[in-house]
Amino acid sequence: MSPLDQRKEVPNLKEDGEGSVQVKMDPNMKIEGAKVFAVYGKGGIGKSTTSSNLSAAFSKLGKNVLQIGCDPKHDSTFTLTGRLVPTVIDILKEVDFHAEELRPEDFVYEGYNGVKCVEAGGPPAGTGCGGYVVGQTVKLLKQNHMLDNTDVVIFDVLGDVVCGGFAAPLQHADRALIVTANDFDSIYAMNRIIAAVHAKSKNYNVRLAGCVANRSKDTDEIDKYCKEVGFNRVAHLPDLDAIRRSRLKKKTLFEMGDDEDILAVQKEYIRLADLLWNGTEGLAPSTMEDRDIFELLGFD
């Protein structure tokens, strides 16, 4: 169903922000009781690796964690479960979209250290809306009481956000976390994501928690941008081969042995999880014009 059709069928819903064709989230779909985080960043920057290890870290702190992958290639929870699990949209197709026929075990899978894993999936390329898929996933989870005893929900969202559909997890999130690298393209994407969070924050409670420097030996460019706009770097994950190998081995970093480098990264994930759990300031950095980012980072 298109957002325009939804507006006709659901009374008193307005467009979600100036220029948007999305409707506001149904208040009944609000996730209650859990702390909700949405992870964004440039395509290929390591959001799924970051999300999965962060989920594992929260579980190490004794939290009940649910990770929701929001990408058609459905590999967000790959290192938690050790496999590609079926998506919500595929399971719904099998029952001709009669959601009442589904049980939790049909679409929720247990991963490392008890982390619950869901892959929302997405519409075929060039068709449909990712926001609809996210909405149906949350609806199914609520109908099956899968959020009742959950402490932490992590939405892992596909790359650079330009459409309202894949900004839909921001309707549910308390905090948005941006994964970036110490390079121009990643920071440029981060600037656009900050703008997307600003747009959603006008109607929802979501605010920015900060950014995670990933696959980066240094953080000087990230820190330069953050200082300019009033943003915070909340973690630094180095460019370790062990992180790449963990993906190939279908494992989280908490299953990759006890080498000094790996233990240091595990400790950083635990520190980040503890920081997010205890609450971060809701940041509202200013965004930069394209030309200004080039001037700041694009030239020596």
Image: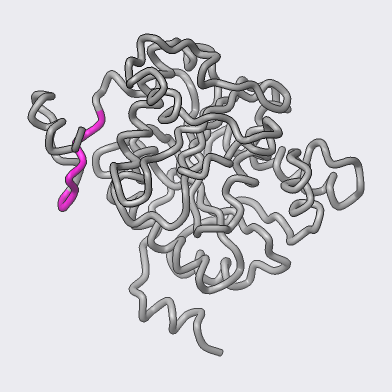
Q: In the image, is residue 23 part of the stretch drawn in magenta?
A: yes
Q: In the image, is residue 243 part of the stretch drawn in magenta?
A: no
Give, as a single range, the part of the protein colored magenta: 18-25
In this orientation, which residue lies closer to the viewer: 59 or 295? 59
Q: Residue at x 33, y 21 (%)?
A: 97
Q: How is the image coloured?
A: one colour
Q: Residue at x 58, y 72 (%)?
A: 183
Q: In x, y percent, where is residue 89?
A: 41, 30
Q: Quadrant of the N terminus?
A: top left
Q: In x, y percent, where is residue 280?
A: 52, 41
Q: Residue at x 9, y 24 (%)?
A: 11
In this orientation, which residue lies closer to the viewer: 57 or 230? 57
Tell whether 260 sits left or right of 55: right
Q: Quadrant of residue 64?
A: top right
Q: In x, y percent, where is residue 95?
A: 38, 18
In this orientation, which residue lies closer to the viewer: 211 or 163? 163
Q: What secondary structure is the stretch in magenta mostly built from?
A: loop
Residue occupying the far right of the picture: 259
Tell whether 65 sits left or right of 14: right
Residue occupying the far bottom of the picture: 300
Tell whether 214 sits left or right of 137: right
Q: Quadrant of the C terminus?
A: bottom right
Q: Residue at x 55, y 31 (%)?
A: 67
